[in-house]
Amino acid sequence: MDPEGVQRRSMHRLQRRQYHAKGPNFLWHLDGYDKLKPYGFCIHGCIDGYSRQIMWLEVGRTNNHPGVVASYFIDCVQNVGGIACVIRGDMGTENVRIAAIQRYLRHEAGDSWSGEKSFLYGRSVANQRIEAWWGQLRRGASDWWITHFKDLRDRGLYCDANAVHVECLLFCYMALIREELQRVARLWNLHRIRPSTRNNSSPHGRPCLLYHHPEMTGAEECKHDVDIDELDVVRDMCCDDLPMDSSPEFIALAELIMTEEGLRMPETANEVQ
């Protein structure tokens, strides 16, 4: 053993950076989740950095289309009645419209994070809040779907090179996965986060309470109000070219077949069989 050497090395040891946000709506983290992308289901989510409240968790045919991601953002802003002080996302082209909208809506604010500083670009792997939460999603939901779709493929019931198979999968499963994601987000926001032994600045408790009642933990509400007329303008400008979950032609054909055969949309994955 070399006690002096150990001490010298420990002096240069990297310390884990502690996360800190002033309160709810100070910093939102957004990112795409691609584990179900090989089967056509592209997930996108956003989490509040302070409370860990899931702001949105959506699925669609793509999570790379800037208009699709922007529509999730605008819907969320409309629902909560304001925007975060800062938003963090990766350098992908899917974030260009959100960045532009955020900076536009915050351009006249007088705080130190207004304008250009209100959207931060960074590497996806360094976007720690949402990256950590994707692990929760995998354990709570996506692992089951991955196994399910692999089973369909292994049994010869699905081939991603077959356009009809792809459209069938999207038509039958999109609503089911969307409903499952809403359930996962709802349960997460209601569950209790235990005290952290590694980061004392992260509050413990239920995300929904931490988000809606920051006074309980001595935090401050950081939300910035938004002019509804301006929000309508950016929606018209940025979300007018959104792709549908399935092609209109396939939907018409599928509905015709369902009517003729007396079928209905599945309510569970097993009903698709």
Image (tube, grey):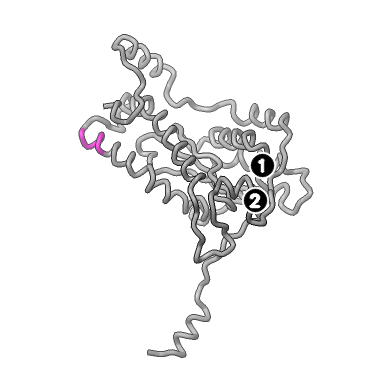
Type of the residue with mark 1: Ile
Q: Could you say which is closer to the camera, residue 55 or residue 146?
A: 55
Read off the magenta span: 151-155
> Residue 58 location, x and y as percent?
49, 36
Residue placed at 29% from the left, 12% from the top? 261
Relative horizontal placement of residue 44, taking residue 80 as reference (left or right) = left
Residue 47's place in the image compared with 219, above or below, is above
User: On the image, numbered disc 2 is attached to which residue?
Assistant: 214
Give the class, few, some or many, for how many residues have Cα within 10 Å of label 2's Cα (few <14, many ≥20): some
Q: Residue at x 41, y 90 (%)?
A: 2
Find numbered disc 2 in the image and state the secondary structure of the residue it sits on. Answer: helix
Residue 14 sits above or below residue 102 on the image: below
Which residue is located at x 51 percent, y 50 percent? 130
Q: Is residue 147 above or below residue 247?
A: below
Evaluate if marks 2 and 1 touch, with contact meaning CB atoms under 8 Å apart: no
Q: Is residue 266 left or right of residue 82?
A: left
The residue carrying mark 1 is 83
Q: CA distance from mark 2 to mark 1?
A: 16 Å
Q: Position of residue 223 (x, y in %)?
A: 68, 45
- Magenta stretch prevailing secondary structure: helix
Residue that lies at the very extreme toward the top in this rendered image:
260
- The amino acid marked with disc number 2 is Pro
The residue that appears at 32% across and 24% down in the rendered structure is 164
Q: Nearer the viewer, residue 113 or 177?
A: 177
| Magenta segment includes 15 | no
In the rendered image, the quadrant that contains the C terminus is: top left
